[in-house]
Amino acid sequence: MSAKPSTPPTELVIEAGRTERHYWADLWRYRELLGFLAWRDIKVRYQQTILGAAWALVQPLASVVIFTFVFGRLAKMPSGNEPYFIVVMAGQLAWQLFANTLGNTSGSLVGNAHLISKIYFPRLTVPLSTVGVALVDFAILLGLFAASLAWTGLIPTYRVVFLPVFVLLTLLLALGAGLWLAALTVRFRDFRIVVPFLLQIGVFATPVGYRTDFLPNWQSLLALNPMTGVIDAYRWCLLSEGTVFYWQSLLFTLAWTAILLATGIWYFRHTEKSFADII
């Protein structure tokens, strides 16, 4: 009886420069790992907590109450045709998605140090996987906003169909800044403290608690903040037709997003090879 032919050994070709040329194809090949990391982060997000997913509402609701009291009651800022807390909630939707994505992305590499130091995979997978958690929190808050609209008897206009476009814009803006911060945090752990501090300050430098279309003299200055265009866009989509959209602020946001995303990917890829040695 003749012996069964053995399987020919797998040929491993080490090709100089292959990683650079095939990086984006490798990123697609590792999409299952990206999905696994995202699902893992979602599962452990509120694990062993008493309130569970309700924590996704506690912090934004506290901010809505504070901003409504400060800007609506004390400062007597106008709110248009909507109750003031609806105006604040629309702004909080945008800020919550941006802040969660930026915060999760910036600390993602250090938080997965055990994985990065052991095996090879495109490191960009790690910060991208954190977007899933931010989207889940955003969906929970969006559900509460929809319930609030129903409770107040307000109905969004046709412009609500543009909301997914501005959600994508928010994610790209946060990812662009987040890639810079994720790569810098690997080398300088100070950024783990700096990022939450910047987000605490940023919420007060961003028109989350008031409408910019009632401040025409300040709109040009406020537009320099890339989140102003995003928040104005959310309110344009979700509030009544009386909401005026300052398109120049959106142009600033688009320019900021393109610059941060392009340079963020470049810097991340430039420093990626050293992550496993430093982290």
Image (cartoon, helix red, strand yellow):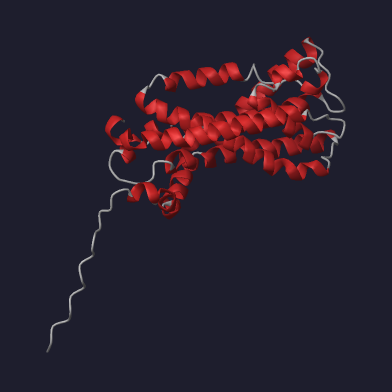
Of residues 21 and 116, the one nearer the viewer is: 21
Q: Residue 263, position in %: x, y?
A: 50, 32
Of residues 240 and 176, the one nearer the viewer is: 176
Of residues 81 and 254, the one nearer the viewer is: 254
From the viewer's perspective, tell me whether residue 12 is left or right of residue 98: left
Q: Quadrant of the N terminus?
A: bottom left
Q: Residue at x 64, y 17 (%)?
A: 205
277 to 125, vertically: above or below: above
3 to 8, vertically: above or below: below
Count of residue discs:
0
126 to 29, vertically: above or below: above
Q: Quadrant of residue 5?
A: bottom left
Q: Residue lying at the far top in this picture: please name it.
A: 74
Of residues 100 and 234, the one nearer the viewer is: 234
Q: Can residue 149 be spotted in the picture?
A: yes
Q: Residue at x 47, y 49 (%)?
A: 35
Q: Residue 193, position in %: x, y?
A: 44, 19
Q: Can residue 101 be spotted in the picture?
A: no
Q: Residue 137, position in %: x, y?
A: 59, 37
From the viewer's perspective, tell me whether residue 156 is left or right of residue 164: right
Q: Residue lying at the far front in this picture: please name it.
A: 16
Q: Residue at x 54, y 35 (%)?
A: 261
Q: Quadrant of residue 188?
A: top left
Q: Quadrant of residue 168?
A: top right
Q: Residue 144, position in %: x, y?
A: 70, 36
From the viewer's perspective, tell me whether residue 272 is left or right of residue 52: left
From the viewer's perspective, tell me whether residue 40 is left or right of residue 85: left
Q: Residue lying at the far bottom in this picture: please name it.
A: 1
Q: Quadrant of the C terminus?
A: top left
